Image: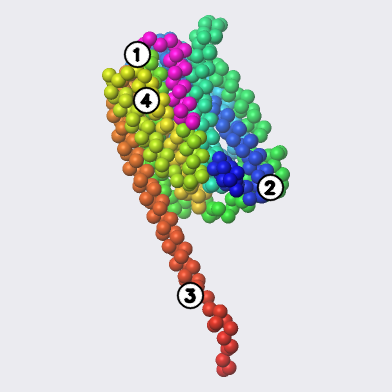
Amino acid sequence: MRWQTVRQFLWGEIPSSNLERRLLLKLDWFILSYCCLMYFTNYLDRANVNNAYVSGMKQELNMQGNDFNKINTIFTCGYIVGMIPNNLMLQVVPPRLWFPSMQIVWGVLTFCSSSVHNVQQLYAIRFFQGISEASTFVGTHYILGSWYKPGELGKRSGIFTSSGLAGTLFSGVLQAAVYQHLGGVGGRSGWRWLFIMDGVITLPIALYGFLIFPDVPSTTKAFYLSEEERAFSQDRLDSDVVHHRLSWDLAKRVLSRWRWYGCSLLFAISGETESFGSNNLMGQWLSAMGGYTVEQVDYYPSGVTAFGIASTLVCATWTDYTRARWPVLVYMCFCCTVAAFCILAWSSPTGLKFFAYYFAGASYAGQATTFAWANQICADDYQERAVVLASMNMWNNAVNAWWPLLFYPATDAPRFKKGMIAMICTCAATLGVTWLVWYLERREQRLANRKAMEHVDQMREDSPSPVEKDKPLKDE
């Protein structure tokens, strides 16, 4: 009994049969292995731009003012543009073809980044990389929701999100190693070799996706799934959701409920707590302060990501077991608020600022938890769930397109005073929206339970009692 409790805590719902156990083992290996590797290279590419900037790209491309922020904003604009078309393509083109194809596109563009001669060329490349990389995050959540039950999603979502953070973590280590060993080789700077190595890592993973990705249960032809497992993969989910025909009624269902508004607002705001890591504020702080080598500027911010990975996995495990998602957002806001106050106190010791940036890595824990929460809220309607998940990411990126330019411009390094004040306000707003979503979810559950009880009572009233059934009929 104790072992089963530990197992359920660590890995979610226990399979009900040997058939389900075998199926989940195969899905976890093949789906998670490819999606995690794909997302790893996705975030590796994003982090490499940040690391390249503080490792010589700024000087070599003569970047001025907010050029670095513009690179990230243009990427975000491409990401927003590509999000909905990429999701629609998953309904037309098999995911085992679309995902790897998009990965090849951004891999080739990464190679191109190693040969740019001015920042304008990098702008163009980053826009199209944003379009191609938009296929990964929400697309993977769509795939996970197609194969896994709601009670199985939290842990997988956490592992998937952590793989992206691992890409960020590895990028700092890779950049330091490349700068030390490949800088100047072949007449290329170390940051240019970083993009080449990124492309070399990306392309073989795309080939792996072509070979093993299983599509969705209704269309899968994966060689490692038996006919029995393919049929069961559909049957075990059919009882958990309400199926609707794709029609304009979907828009009515989505817009007439609170779910789309609440979940979209929650991630649009809470996602900005990740600004510590997504804008590499620690790297910019170290670079602006001076006194640190290029290798140190690349290595030290890795601690932010490492703490983010640990927070994500621990929180995902805990929330999957308790099914309570909101405490993670409270924890995230507490950590980011403390970190922002520590950095605002500019006369504080350097060691305290190191602690603050590392402590702020907890902000990454909110991403997996927020999407798991949305999956849980919308579990009864898979079409609505797909729209809500896509909208959450879309609105967050719409905000993120201008947020760094306003609150975290590179010219504000090393203090980022406006950004730290904005972070405190963001955390306060996140707590408010978290309470709102929690309240609306509980109210919806109470109404559903009341309706179910009224239905049961009505059934009892309409059904004849045992005495009435046994009572002989009167002769006419």
Amino acid residing under circle 1: Met
Name the mark on residue 443. Answer: none
Name the mark on residue 356. Answer: 4
Amino acid residing under circle 3: Glu
Q: Are marks 1 and 4 in contact (CB under 8 Å)?
A: no
Please give the residue where the numbered disc 3 appears in the rendered image: 461
Question: Gap in Å between the C-alphas at discs 4 and 3?
Answer: 63 Å
Please give the residue where the numbered disc 1 appears in the rendered image: 289
Q: Residue furthest front?
A: 2
Is 290 in the magenta?
A: yes
Amino acid residing under circle 4: Ala
Mark 4 vs 2, N-terminal side: 2
Mark 3 vs 2, N-terminal side: 2
Tell me the quadrant of the picture where the C terminus can be found. bottom right
Which residue is at a point 36% across and 11% down the rendered structure image?
290
For label 3, count other residues whose C-alpha is less than 10 Å away and answer few (under 14), some (14-19) or many (20+).
Answer: few
Against 10, is 163 above or below?
above
Q: Which residues are magenta?
A: 289-310
Please give the residue where the numbered disc 2 appears in the rendered image: 18
Question: Gap in Å between the C-alphas at discs 1 and 4?
Answer: 16 Å
Question: Gap in Å between the C-alphas at discs 2 and 1?
Answer: 58 Å
Amino acid residing under circle 2: Asn
Q: Out of 108 and 19, give the one closest to the viewer.
A: 19
Against 185, is 42 above or below?
below
Against 358, is 258 above or below?
below
Q: Out of 163 and 388, give the one closest to the viewer.
A: 163
Q: Is residue 97 left or right of residue 307?
A: right
**Element type where label 1 sits in the image:** helix
For marks 1 and 4, give the one nearer the viewer. Answer: 4
